[in-house]
Image (cartoon, rainbow, N blue to C red):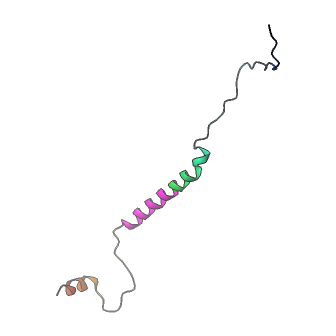
């Protein structure tokens, strides 16, 4: 028999170390977080713009929005 020049590794009995894979591949991490932030901003934009709140602002004296809409059709 020929002898191997490699040293034999001692056998481990019991638990072995298991490599944990990252949830997100490191080369796609920036892309993932960019997409997450864009989705969150889009959701906030949609929620903010779908409310049914009338515009309340500094109107000039004598301005009545309902009256102005009917007057503009004449």
Q: From the viewer's perspective, is residue 20 above or below residue 41? A: above
Q: Residue at x 43, y 64 (%)?
A: 45
> From the viewer's perspective, is residue 30 above or below residue 13?
below
Nearest the eye: 3 or 70: 3
Queried whether the magenta region covers residue 23, the answer comes back as no
Assess whether residue 38 is covered by the magenta stretch. Answer: yes
Looking at the image, residue 49 sits to the left or right of residue 23; the answer is left
Q: Which residues are magenta?
A: 37-51
Question: Residue farthest to the bottom?
Answer: 61
Magenta residues: mostly which secondary structure? helix
> In the rendered view, does 55 fall on the left or right side of 5?
left
Whole-percent x and y of residue 52?
33, 68
Q: Position of residue 41 (x, y in %)?
A: 48, 61
**Residue 69: x percent and y percent?**
23, 83
17 with respect to 37 (left or right): right
The residue depicted at 52 percent of the width and 57 percent of the height is: 37
Most foreground residue, 56 or 40? 40
Q: Residue at x 62, y 37 (%)?
A: 21
Q: Is residue 61 above or below residue 53?
A: below
How many badges with numbers are in the image?
A: 0
Q: In percent of the image, x 71 and y 20: which residue is there?
A: 14
Query: Which quadrant would the N terminus be assigned to in this image?
Result: top right
């Amino acid at each position: 028999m020929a002898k191997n020049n490699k040293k034999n590794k001692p056998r481990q009995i019991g638990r072995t170390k298991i490599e944990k894979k990252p949830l997100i591949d490191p080369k796609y991490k920036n892309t993932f977080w960019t997409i997450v932030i864009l989705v969150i901003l889009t959701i906030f934009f949609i929620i903010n713009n779908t409310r049914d709140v009338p515009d309340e602002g500094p109107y000039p004296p004598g301005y009545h929005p309902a009256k102005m809409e009917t007057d503009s059709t004449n």
